[in-house]
Amino acid sequence: MSNELFKIIKGSIPVLLSAPHNFPQIRNDRIKSRDTNTGQIVNELCSATGCWGIISTSVQKDPNWYKDSEFRIELFKLVTKNKIDLVLDVHGKKIDYEKEVVFYPNKTFTGLHSKILTNLNQANFINDSQLTICEHLNEFKISALEAEIRRDYREIDSNEYQITLGVLKGIIEKFR
């Protein structure tokens, strides 16, 4: 299922993977570059695990910045309709970022599942006016986890890419 702004992958487990920056996005009237290979990561993980997925397929308002973006609205519909227990929001980081993958859990995730992230890099959302997808889901008591993945760990033919998939699969398996 898809439209011009996003592709939806039907799943069989209560986990939704999202790649809102698979294509460039518009924020504050400027076009921001895409997070390379995040859509590929979501496609592969959905195929391997049975997760639901939503992937941006066109330039659009930044779903992680604007609550009224069509992508975010559709994501919330999928969560409600399919009784999703976890949203794993896949993003990219630049190559010069120190840590390979950093997870940003929302408060609901932290309250219910903090042990899942033991031994993994974690950070907190910045306390600012931006309400990310994961922070917004917290208002509805839905566990959400933003994964910020360094560029070299998103390069498809690399060992690092396989490590990334393995780490994300490990988290998904906890929600089967």
Image (cartoon, helix red, strand yellow):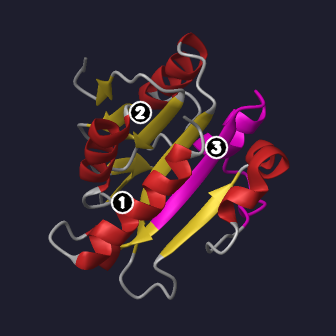
- Residue on which disc 2 sits: 51
Numbered range of the magenta stretch: 124-148
Residue 108 seen in render = yes
Give the left or right position of residue 122, taking residue 169 as reference.
right
Give the mark nearer the N terminus: 1 vs 3. Answer: 3
Q: Nearer the viewer, residue 153 or 133?
A: 153
Residue flagged by tag 2: what amino acid is it?
A: Cys
- Residue on which disc 1 sits: 165
| SS of the residue under disc 1 | helix
Q: Nearer the viewer, residue 60 or 168?
A: 168
Residue under the image location 62 percent in, 72 percent down: 120
Residue at mark 1 to residue at mark 2: CA–CA distance: 13 Å
Across and down, in percent, residue 162 comes to: 29, 67
Residue under the image location 43 percent in, 25 percent down: 70
Quadrant where the C terminus sits is top right
Residue under the image location 44 percent in, 52 percent down: 169
| SS of the residue under disc 3 | strand
- The disc at residue 144 is 3
| Within-10-Å neighbours for mark 2: few <14, some 14–19, many 20+ | many
